[in-house]
Image: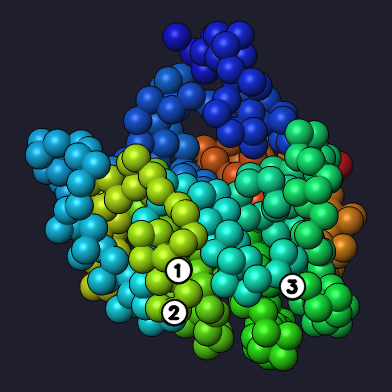
Amino acid sequence: MSSGQLFDRARAVMPGGVNSPVRAFGAVGGTPPFIESASGALLHTVDGTSLIDFVASWGALMFGHADPDIVEAITTAATKGSSYGMPTRAEVELAELICELMPSIEVIRMVNSGTEATASVIRLARAAVGKPGIVKFEGCYHGHADPFLVKAGSGMATFGEPTSPGVPAATVADTHLAKFNDLDSVAAAMANGQIAAVIVEPVAGNMGCIPPVEGFLQGLRDLCDTHHALLIFDEVMTGFRVALGGAQARYEVTPDLTALGKVIAGGTPGAAYGGRRDLMRMISPDGPVYQAGTLSGNPLVTAAGLAQLRKLTMQPHLYDQMQEFGLALTHELELVATAHEVPIVIRCVGGMMGVFLGIDRANSWDDLANLDTELFGRFHTEALRQGVMLPPSAYEAWFLMESHLAMGEDIIDRLTTALTAAMASR
Ligand SMILES: *Cc1c(COP(=O)(O)O)cnc(C)c1O
């Protein structure tokens, strides 16, 4: 059965035929390929094609699909039982490893998704500070919990929903917006004195890939200290993707609390939040802030996460290698854009990159107003024709995996061909 036939069946029984909106390809046109299997850098579709994958499970995979070490860890764990609802040794080992690699995290709690991590961390921050307000940035995404569904980046930008019906106005009344890379806007949002926490993607990854400008993250740290508010890094995407210790290691700014997901679960449904001991001790059962989970710390998840993180600790140069490949690709794509007189901005940070077509500056959500999403749609279609799966929205980051590195020249050829075709057909 072809992808088209499966998509028809899927649409009859699932919203948009998918379990997460961007997968429906609404932003780029066409039908999403259905995946039969995947290995290394390649997705194998039910249509018999193979695609070089830059989605990488939205950033969760660092080494490629079906990495033998991770597969072995998961299968070994599965033979011992897939869930107990009781503590395990692997949970302790994963917690210890994350605390060691990310020293701002002294105590950690595992959960099942990034959404759950950020929702929980905000509850904790509000409890600890005793104020209701949070500051979030336009274009940053922190999962789909109610308090965050305001100007929340890629998925929502793609679908033109500045906020979602079903979210009571009262729930977002305490969510204050600021502009990424603009400290004055943060100071203004904090001026009411009601702010418990500032939450930020330290490298914004849900509006392409936008690194912090020099001094921005430290400025947030200082503003939080001045206002007795907590600084929360949502490193669900950047954690162990932009550097071994996450963005907080790369930019040397220490948050009070951190949300993690994606990479720490090695492509299984797991996430976590953690931070300062005095704050995390407020979490139940040590303290009064309630948060729980039937499958939290699941043995398959902890096995996969441990396997991936242990591999990363043994290959500390991977981040530089990925960025080097990203920069080589950037250079060639820029040449194509220049030849066609199309403005382009490309950013690479470790294993993440962002490609912005049609604009010449990308430091904040406002800068993306004139993003050429139509041209990106054509680039996406041409890339598929060349056998490359780019993330299906102009607002999504691209994710690098170790398995891309061995095929770097080939990838560059295919993507320059695709971009040339997309630009030539304007
Ligand atoms: C993916 C993501 C989330 C949400 O994680 P889910 O596991 O999809 O719920 C939250 N924050 C950031 C920065 C993310 O990239």
Q: Position of residue 371 (x, y in %)?
A: 84, 54
Query: Which of disc 1 and disc 3 is earlier in sequence?
Result: 3
Q: To which residue does mark 1 refer?
A: 282
Q: Secondary structure at mark 3?
A: strand
Residue 222, picture quadrant: bottom right
Q: Is residue 95 above or below residue 67?
A: below
Q: CA distance from mark 1 to mark 2?
A: 7 Å
Quick one: label 3, few (<14), some, or many (20+) residues within 10 Å? many
Q: Is residue 412 left or right of residue 274?
A: right
**Which residue lies at the image location 14% right of the left edge and 36% below the top edge?**
81
Give the camera-side residue of 293 and 64.
293
Q: Is residue 167 left or right of residue 107?
A: right
Give the camera-side residue of 270 and 147.
147
The amino acid type found where label 3 is placed reads: Ile
The amino acid type found where label 2 is placed reads: Asp
Q: Secondary structure at mark 2?
A: helix
Q: To which residue does mark 2 refer?
A: 278
Color theme of the render: rainbow
Dots 3 and 1: beta carbons under 8 Å? no
Q: Is residue 312 left or right of residue 343?
A: left
Residue 341, picture quadrant: bottom right
Tell me if residue 336 can be seen.
no
Q: CA distance from mark 2 to mark 3?
A: 19 Å
**Which residue lies at the image location 53% right of the left edge and 78% below the top edge?**
256
Q: Secondary structure at mark 1?
A: loop
Q: To which residue does mark 3 refer?
A: 195
Q: Is residue 77 above or below residue 409?
A: above
